[in-house]
Amino acid sequence: MASTPYHDDEEERKPLTHDSSSSDPARNSLDSVTSSSDTSIALEHLNEDGTAVGNGHTKGLSGTRALDDKGNDYDDEDGFYRPPRRQPLERRNRRIMWALGGLCLGGWLLALVLFLSQQTYRHASSIPFDPAATASHGSGKAVTLDQYLTGAWRPRHQQISWIAGANGEDGLLLEQNAGSGKDYLVVEDVRSRTPNAEAQDSQTLMKDGPFKVDGLDVQPNGVWPSKDLKKVLVMSSEQKNWRHSFTGLYWIFDVASQQAEPLDPAKPSDRIQLASWSPQSDAIVFTRNNNMYLRKLSSNSVEQITKDGGSELFYGVPDWVYEEEVFGGNSVTWWSEDGKFIAFLRTNETAVPEYPIQYFVSRPSGKDPAPGEESYPEVRQLKYPKAGAPNPVVDLQFYDVANNDVFSVTTDNDFPDDDRLITELVWAGRDGKVLVKNTNRESYILKVALIDVVERTGTVVREEDVKALDGGWFEVSEETRYIPGDPGNGRPHSGYIDTVIKEGYDHLAYFTPLDNPEPVMITTGEWEVVNGPSAVDLKANLVYFVATKESSIQRHVYTVNLDGTSLQHYSEHRKEGYYDVSFSTGVGFALLSYQGPDIPWQEVRSTPSFKGHYYKHRFETNTGLAKLAAAHELPIEIYQTVNISGVDLNLVERRPPHFDENKRYPVLFQLYGGPGSQQVDKKFTVDFQSYVASNLGYVVVTLDGRGTGLIGRKARTIVSGHIGYYEGMDQITAAKLWAKKPYVDPERMAIWGWSYGGFMALKTLELDGGETFKYGMAVAPVTDWRFYDSIYTERYMQTPQNNPDGYDNTTISNMTALQGNVRFLMMHGVADDNVHMQNSLTLLDKLDLAGVENYDVHVFPDSDHSIYFHNANRMVYDRLNNWLVNAFNGEWLRTEDAIPMERIGATSHRR
């Protein structure tokens, strides 16, 4: 990617902390010696008569006595030259000069000690990265914007696709396109990478990647082996739809013959939205044109499951809002464990209003316009339920595979169609039981239904009202874990593990039997479990999970018995760490990923559940990243908490290298701030904020205010009904604290964010009115929550009909307050399907009506929420960089009440 200069002047493009010293370590050492020699020579000149008192030598200077001239001043006994006796004034002068010399020598020694202790003489690459450093050492390079944009600072992170063997063998992984002479798709033992380790034999599923079917070249984009490892489902010709969804051509690849056939032999070129294997490896269910089909491997034909799917009625795949806000994926299809039933959602969005997405440069549909219409933009009509608008009606249906029968099950005490969100489904064993989670539209009432598809009955077995508990909401999650009964192993009944609220924190609970609403608490305490159980060892009744027990900004892995006893550390907990983990299918092995604060690494290790020899292999150490970090001067990160309204909030301050408390720095606040989110953590991260601190030399502060995650529900749910207010006030309170610090220039403080962070940047500027923050930058901001999607917004704000004042207060509406800032910047993608361009355009209209002009705007044609189309992402960050530099340089102070230079008698010139 070509680099765009962010300053016109070559001298200004140099980092503020650029290294002017030699990069040769030997030369650095020589320079140090030369400096010391110069100091010694100066000390030798202190005596007026030229006597070399500094080191016992004389210099051939005027007035110097030669040591071999043994006159009356020479003492033969001790062999030293003794100067002649002086008058009292001379002695006093000599004492003064000795004192001055001693002070100079002491100062030199102190400087030498500091010089050696701070290691500034060392070449940067010889000083390892230290996340706990409180001062800069060495003379490394500054982080560049190009490095950030090209991913140079992104740690290498390997994903393991764990897979069970055909006979249930544990510790196997699916390796695709590994290179180095390996076959394209291989199942191998995770221990095979370590010499002399006990490992199972590998199995090749696909020898080569590309293959032919009836003369057509097929290049895989996705592969999914059957459970018995005899077939591979292959997708080619992938086309993106929304964030998680896509379409493609699907093929069934036979492992034994290394040949393939179309998933639907009758329609091989028809695009398919979703396909998945039966657990018995004998059938594949798929969705095409929003209808569901079944292909049994015993037949070359497909069976059509549903027939009325179309543009407004979806089967087995979610619509836009369920894909984005509920399931975070492209599937709402679930096979039962025995392969006898398929559960799926039927989504009817007939009543959902449309929002037009315009494309002025590209044509995502791939269709050519009609003759004479080439100059018109392509418009995609998106069914998008905004807050308060009709939602899609979603209901649960089932398919009986053996009887080719689609049916639904009525559940007692269910929500009405227009007040129901189906958020999770888990098959509970092999006897036709299924757990379904539903909430009301505003996500504060949870109902867990237990459905029996054999008997075709359904009952609500658990109901909770979180608004009555703490005034908050239920977050959507898919973390419920079914636990089969095993009477001989201490589990007389089947049950499930879920995340529940316990004394204001998210914890694991075990519900058994399935219809029991009162759980056994697995974890408790003033800390939170992250993303439910990571794995469960059913033989040992052992639960693995990730939690914030050590600190809300760290993550560690733990084990605990199913009954809540014997909580143990699995990851290293005696020093700070941020860990992630994934487990093999039999829980005998784990991929442990250390993500910070030091250089990230990954290792595979056996778990307490593994009965063989202990195994550990660290296969990723990010040595290249370590060298890069050693060669650069990264910001000094100061983690701390600030107490605001009785709540301890996490904050990180990034200080420029060689930070000087006697200087006055500009300060940039960066935030996201969305409910349940977290920006301040102990991951190793070099991002745009790091670049700003390292290269531009500004202080950068990130505060996770009230409403954010992992600090307990009391601090989180306070924002319910009026998002933006408490979060913004927390940013202002922290900024006022920073403005009082002696190293901060209070006239040069800015705030920026993207998406929810863009909303928060504008909301904070509005609440502050220019008193604290003088500048702001907002990318893809929400400006009125009536314009955002219903499921996300109403979870935190209720509907506009039920909370009109809340929506009025959270909207960016005070133009006078925005005018109080020096200047702010807004940027938005025109084709943003998530946060619509409508948000920025309506705010611009309000600014126009109020006559407010202290802002800049940049829009990006055909870019969605990520802003990438046609070099747009580079332009976003170039603009942020240049705009911020100009702000802190005082350039925007000159834009109000502009006067022609000729009128004030100035000479016109170009800068």
Image (tube, grey):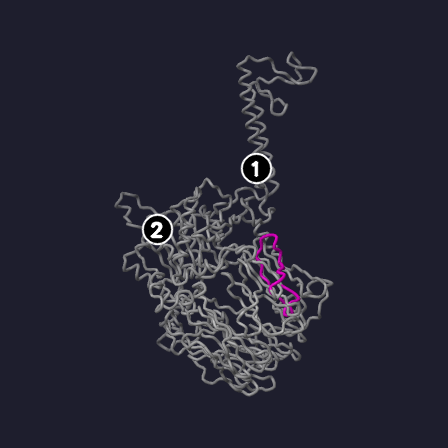
Where does the magenta region start and end?
A: 564-590
Residue 672: % across, % down: 44, 58
Direction from residue 337 to residue 901 in the image, left or right: left
Image quarter of residue 167: bottom right
Q: Is residue 846 above or below residue 94?
A: below
Between 843 and 734, the one lying in front of the other is 734
Looking at the rendered structure, the secondary structure element under dot 1 is helix
Residue found at x 50% / y 78%: 459
Between 161 and 234, the one lying in front of the other is 161
Between 402 and 297, the one lying in front of the other is 402
Residue at the extreme bottom of the image, as rendered: 403
Image quarter of residue 109: top right
Q: Amino acid at mark 1?
A: Leu
Residue 738: % across, % down: 43, 47
Residue 353 seen in the current view:
yes
Between 5 and 705, the one lying in front of the other is 705
Q: Which residue is mark 2?
A: 770
3D distance between C-alphas at marks 1 and 2? 43 Å
Q: Is residue 566 magenta?
A: yes
Q: Is residue 334 magenta?
A: no
Q: Amino acid at mark 2?
A: Gly
Kindly report which numbered mark, 1 or 2, lies closer to the viewer in this rendering: 2
